Amino acid sequence: MQLLSSQNRDQLLEQLANTKFDLLIIGGGITGAGIALDATTRGLKVALIEKNDFASGTSSKSTKLIHGGLRYLKQFEVKLVREVGKERAIVHKLAPHLVKPEKMLLPLIQGGTYGPLMTSVGLWVYDFLADVKGKDKRKMLSAKDTLKQEPLLEVQKSALKGSGYYAEYRTDDARLTMENLKTAVSKGAFVANYVKGVSFQKNDSGQVEALHCQDELNGGEFTIQADFIVSAAGPWVDTIREEDRSLKGKKLFLSKGVHIVVPRERFPIQQAIYFDVPDGRMIFAIPRLRVTYIGTTDTPYDGDSNNIPILKEDIDYLLEATNNMFPNINLQESDIESSWAGLRPLIYEEGKSASEMSRKDEIFESNSGLISIAGGKLTGYRKMAERIVDLVGKKFEELKGVSLSACQTKNIPLTGGPFQNDQEVDDLILSYTEMLKPFKLGSETAAYLVANYGKQTEAIIELLSKEFQGNNPHNALARAEAYFCINNEQAQKLTDFYDRRTGRLYFNLPSIEPTTEAVIDVFASELGWSDTRIQKELEELNQAIYVVAKAFKSSSAQAV
Ligand code: FAD
């Protein structure tokens, strides 16, 4: 079985340069990862390149919900809600440690966006479209039961009319991308981060036949040959269509979404809440181990897609919205521990605002044969991949006379599993809690490890037992995770580790500084880093911390 290791990069890039692939995918976000898995398991020889780290684009910046998108019902997006609604249960089954059921509470406040009747009917339709069954079906709660569910709403008591209580799922978008990529690699895909697709090579009839690439880590250029090239470049899809000279007709519209993270004790909600903002929008507040995160904004963006600023006005919007619903909490800018900003790659629709624009995915086929996919949701990645591979499969059959099998991914558990059900996940947390006791680590660590790595936690605990000697437990754990991520998840940089592999940059920022030295030590020994490289890595990590935790405090630039 192939591994997604950082150790064999030279060999991997050589293989990419010297193999003729059936399919080359540009972009290692969830869309590209899903396509890689689907295509590989249908028998295609697949390569995927990512210009930065995997999931470093939108796929680590979402609200991290596997959800049907209740609000799209208001826009009559019935087909979209039906598809992604049904996908929730499938993606949950594929990785129950990573996609966990999360009941959502929608409080109904006097004068709010929806009344009890509208909410009840809306949630019924939502459940019906997604085929939600049994105890997961929506319930309408009285004001009294709502307060039992979420005592922090006590402050709204006189205006509280009750709530809708319905089923959703939460995940970690970057980890979901990672596990799709790892599963694809275990089935034979060739996958590399820090490789940028720069320009196309076309044959005499103008058809794309190869992609000239740049090694963004060590420098150097090479070319990847493929019968078909798919661009799953998210917010950069139009940049690539421009390079292909096929940017006409429908175009992308980028909408920025910001989230903020506060310590759980400053906003101690008991469960996920979807609540009204005075401007008519709604936002989520979601508890996650030691923190609560809140989001999102939805504003047009035409700045640099590689560097998305979090502005003071974004922060103020989220703080005001939260304090409007929970005035007793009185969240302040100084409570914000971390934050993130991402871009929704939407398909432009004349006359609509950012939040009104459809979240549907769309496929563009250019005269050169380049196929691009944009729009869509994290939740719908598997169906998006199926559509793309069906299309590639038709063309493959025309070219080679070989037909591909039907999509298999519904039945392929992701790495970290398989699990029979949620109970097995809970049992595993209990069993790892016991195994972690000798290392002075508790149940919260076990829950974090299982959510992040599933059954792969066992390999991390094995590494931990070697690292524990003489190290404090938290450093030993960080070292064990670093070994695992370098050798199994192509972590190339400190930021890959602290951001996309472990989520510490957002959800456990205070754990970074005390563990940095230990983690650098592992990276340096595993990847042969020089002092200059260590210095560069530290600067990049400090910059990343500054961006999520501090930059907005001095930023009041105009929203673009
Ligand atoms: P990306 O993740 O952006 O991946 C594209 C990749 O292509 C990038 O990593 C980029 O570096 C790479 N790339 C670009 N150019 C090149 C090149 N030349 N060579 C090589 N690589 C290249 N959906 C949900 O289902 N649930 C949610 O809760 C949710 N919340 C959201 C909240 C926000 C604020 C936002 C912005 C989106 C949210 N979404 C949600 C939508 C979801 O996050 C996106 O639909 C999804 O992540 C898009 O993934 P992608 O792979 O298409 O794009």
Image (cartoon, rainbow, N blue to C red):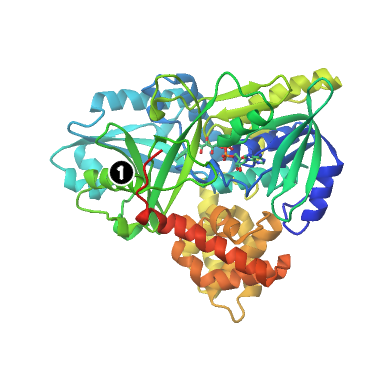
Q: Nearer the viewer, residue 122 or 365?
A: 365
Residue 471 percent across, percent down from the top left:
58, 78
* Residue at mark 1: 317
Query: Is residue 426 found left or right of 555 in the rendered image?
Result: right
The residue drawn where x is 48% and y is 60% is: 545
Number of numbered tags placed on the structure image = 1
Query: Height in image: 201 above or below 217?
Result: above
Query: Is residue 65 found left or right of 485 in the rendered image?
Result: left
Q: Which amino acid type corresponds to the residue marked 1 in the rendered image?
A: Tyr
Q: Nearer the viewer, residue 95 or 13?
A: 13
The residue drawn where x is 32% and y is 23% is: 121
Query: Height in image: 439 above or below 253?
Result: below
Q: Is residue 418 visible?
A: no
Residue 255 percent across, percent down from the top left:
45, 34
**Ligand 1's quadrant:** top right
Q: State the SS at label 1.
A: helix
| Figure quadrant of residue 532 | bottom right
Q: Is residue 374 visible?
A: yes
Residue 465 percent across, percent down from the top left:
63, 72
Where's the C terminus, which quadrant? top left
The residue drawn where x is 35% and y is 45% is: 314
Q: Alpha-carbon neighbours of circle 1 within 10 Å: few (<14), some, or many (≥20)?
A: some
The residue drawn where x is 70% and y is 54% is: 217
| Figure quadrant of residue 203 | top right
Query: Height in image: 304 above or below 487?
Result: above
Residue 525 percent across, percent down from the top left:
71, 70
